[in-house]
Amino acid sequence: MDGGGVEASATAAWMERHRQMYERATRHPFIVSIRDGTVDLSAFKRWLSQDYMFVRGFVAFVASVLLKCCKQEDSSDMEIILGGVASLSDELSWFKNEAAKWDVDLASVSPLKSNLEYCRFLRSFTEPEISYTVAVTTFWIIETVYQDSFGFCIEEGNKTRPELLSTCQRWGSPEFKQYCQYLQRIADRCLANASADAVKSAEEAFIRVLELEIGFWEMSSSQS
């Protein structure tokens, strides 16, 4: 295919085109409050419990990306995506341990509106008509928003509270950043060979993820 007129790096072009929304997703006041040490701990606990619920739904999403990958003629991406699936078991255990530390009863938590909306979006990717290109691009931007957000909280000059550092280091680490870069290269390769319609759908999903991430931070801050 002709690549639909995609630039050499579609993802970089989108980052530039949607810079304002990307900044809102990765430098949201909730994230800034973690970095500057002023976060309301009740908001942090709300985020912790809601994100645990989110990750449970995220498992099925990543599994669906892996399944689409396995159906490609070239399934060389499988090990990288499989690594993402494997890490989620450890992630769920981490959330349970953190919840116990903060005295958060996960069994009594119900997903709030923004969380439900995000999880509905993720469930749509199990549909066979959604291409691997769109799915893996969506996977990349979801992970990247978290990496960039929490990486910001451990950059030089941060005043992040010591008890929140393990959270920030989990997603802000150089290792997780490298994983996101691997996913970005996969997404760009797929987009370079995709139809114009697929590229358009992938960009729409990219924008939708940013909207949903902003909504998730807002929910954590205000219980909306």
Image (tube, helix red, strand yellow):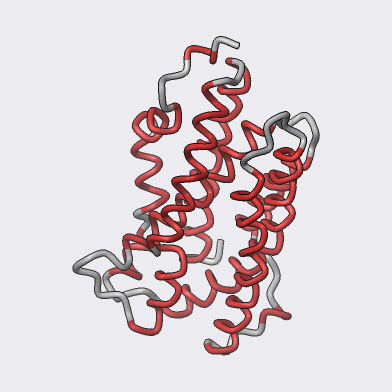
Q: Residue 4: image x %, image y %?
A: 54, 13
Figure check: 179 above or below 127: below
Left or right: where 95 falls relative to 185: right
Total numbered labels placed on residues in the image: 0
State which quadrant residue 147 falls in: bottom left
Q: Residue at x 49, y 44 (%)?
A: 210
Q: Residue 106: image x %, image y %?
A: 67, 79
Foreground of the two, 61 or 104: 61
Q: Residue at x 53, y 49 (%)?
A: 142
Q: Residue at x 24, y 70 (%)?
A: 158
Figure check: 84 above or below 200: below
Foreground of the two, 135 or 43: 135
Foreground of the two, 53 or 216: 53
Q: Residue at x 52, y 29 (%)?
A: 189
Figure check: 145 above or below 17: below
Question: Which residue is outermost to the top?
Answer: 2
Q: Quadrant of the N terminus?
A: top right
